[in-house]
Amino acid sequence: MARAATIAALLLLPGVGAQPAAGELVNPCLNATFEALPFCDATLAIDLRAADAVSRMTIPEKIDALDTKTGPIASLGLPAYNWWSEASSGVMGSRPTTKFAYPVTTAMSFNRTLWRATGAAIGREARALMNAGAAYSTYWAPVVNLAREPRWGRNIEVPGEDPYLTGEYATEFVGGFQAAPEDPYHLQASACCKHYVANELENTRQPDGEQWDRQHVDSNVTQRDLVDSYMVPFQACVEKGKVSSLMCSYNAVNGVPSCANDWLLRTVARDAWHFDGYITSDCDADSNVYDAHHYAATPEEAVADVLKAGTDVDCQSFVGQHARSALDKGLITEADMDARLVNLFKVRLRLGHFDLSFDAAKPRGPLDEIDADAVVCSDAHLDASMEGLAQSATLLKNDGALPLKPSGTAAVVGPNALLSKADAGYYGPTDAADAVVLAVGTDLTWAAEGKDATSIVFTAAQLELIDAVATASATPVVVVVFSATPLDLTPLLARSDGKVGAVVHVGQPSVTVKGLGDLLYGRRSFAGRAVQTVYPAAYADQISIFDFNMRPGPSAFARPDCATNESACPRGTNPGRTYRFYVDEPVVPFGFGLSYTTFAYAVRSAPTTVDLAPLRAAYAGVAAARGDGGPAFLSLHDDAAAATYAVDVTNTGDIDADDVVLGFVTPPGAGVDGVPLKELFGFERVHVKAGETKTVYLYPALSKFKTVAEDGALAARPGDYAIEFGIPETRGRMGYAAATLAAF
């Protein structure tokens, strides 16, 4: 086989959800009828322009504009508009666009520059398609929920299990997606961080056959877990990423549907985090307030609940169908609708809908000149797509099977090696090949939006295939695992007969899988790190997917391996979720990843103490401002660096390579009474030539030295902290260093 062709194995991943049709954008302010009106005056504040536009709409127009598919607004000279488009791994729609690796893969690079470049490329193509009349301007991406559960169907769409990492990914992706370097006054495109919040369940079945799904589930989450886990990425997305949209989720949170949850949408997002964009419901989430959660007694009451809570636009048409009746019954006022519409029009103004031409032939600003033919699927974007895999693929085992010999032949076999082979059971001849690359794993039939996985182990057919190929091969097999579900890799990693020579995890890359060949043949070195803990198979028998508690302890839910009536099943035990709380031995720990070279770390400079007085003062301030007894949120803008660590990274091998330096903090009392075992506080990716030393600087924020009470209250946590760089599981092959810090 020609190695270049065979290495580029394809895994087709269709777009998420049905995509709306696009339509041409028209600026009404280019029309003499409207050009002198205040909403067309670019010298006025956006708030004033938006309020003026809304004030000119009729009530039927206002009601119609509360739904995601908005009809023409004659009062403003606007054509129809659709708020819904998708772009987590590329602009989705009828026209071909550059497809990037899914976030579960891209995040493994731990490279902020790559994440921003990915967002920028996708946002650029979105703007180019707007100008071509082939797309709208508002995109519901990225997904910033946590991979808190290995069976969750949408692990493919998120950057991993760690709140800080996910927040950093959101910040960079959104920053690149929305920012237009040539136009500081307008958004390139509008991003949306979703699904707010605790939405990590799709559709699954209880042991006794009862089926739960994302539309009906009530996520029972402690205030402690909300504050220090589930909400962390969303706060970063709002405060640091300055995202222009949030999506409220299908589920209820502690009894209140997210899209009718005034505390989530107003008290936290708008008041505490100062969110200034628009809030969309997930599709049908507004109607779920009435017909799934039965939170509201009538459709009209549901409309009142979501509008008054702060949901600005309804994905689908429930609000539009029942708003007139709600208005007539006095459940809502015109002012309630106006408040929602002003938020929507502020974002449309930021996108230039009333300032630009969307016509390269008659540009009114630099964004008008972005041409689809020159931008979409450009060489630069295709190169960026390749980097998503090349920088992220993670080497989990290598007993000398990699890199492959450039002069040799490689047989690529397995269910994930060819598009036409969707099921396990296929493998081609291997006896004539110098090397065998076996591609196994999962696809969207295993886990996806609307479907949770039922297992975290390879299928029996794939295990049989692995054994058959390994036995038949004359050389140790290189196994490449395509999966967003963190499968138990024990059959590969613990095999002791030498027949599995290397294991590579690639998550779910772009459909072309470009970049993998360069890694397998040693033209580049692996530097990806695991963003999900790989649990042993028994984990899925211990804890129900419905248990949203992050911390270990008794579970209120039945053990998943009990197949009798749910009430008769023994309760499960939560061993803790993610590396921050999991108390048992993982198969692959968070942050694990090997290289073709070796690294050594040395702490060049480190403080010995840190004064937590500024943190105490900050928490006292937010608690006093809160005044309602609920959780307080310290602004990330006030969360200063508590210390500076300089770490020397030395490439002790003979191959130039990238390295990812991970910084962890272990608090006093780790693992006791809900205190995390350790937490990621920083990371940097650096390229180090063979024999070279480079210095990396990491800065733990003050908030990494906090404690979170059961009610969500925040306080400084004095004591002795352990600081680690790297993980001990790779010590001796990859860099590792440690220090101590006394916080007072």
Image: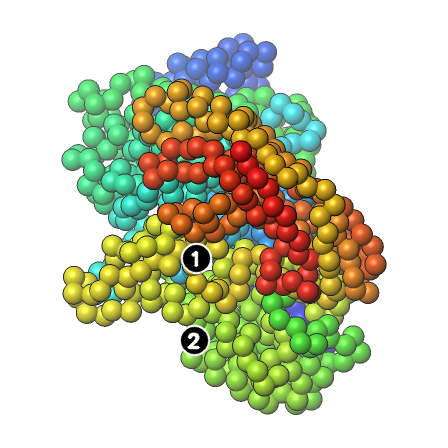
Residue 686 in sight from this viewpoint = no
Can you tell which quarter of the image residue 250 is in? top left
Q: Identify residue type, mark 2.
A: Thr
Neighbor class of circle 2 (other Cα within 10 Å; few <14, some 14-19, many 20+) is few
Residue at the (48%, 13%) spot, across then down: 48
* Marker disc for residue 147: none
Circle 1 residue: 582
Residue at the (27%, 64%) spot, across then down: 559
Circle 2 residue: 459
First in residue order: circle 2 vs circle 1: 2
* 478 up-or-down from 552: above or below: below
Residue 494 in sight from this viewpoint = yes
Front residue of 148/716: it is 716
**Quadrant in which the N terminus appears:** bottom right
Q: Identify residue type, mark 1.
A: Tyr
Neighbor class of circle 1 (other Cα within 10 Å; few <14, some 14-19, many 20+) is many
Label 2 and label 1: CA atoms lie apart by 25 Å
Residue 138 in percent (x, y) is at: 50, 36
Front label number (2 vs 1): 1
Residue 288 in percent (x, y) is at: 26, 42
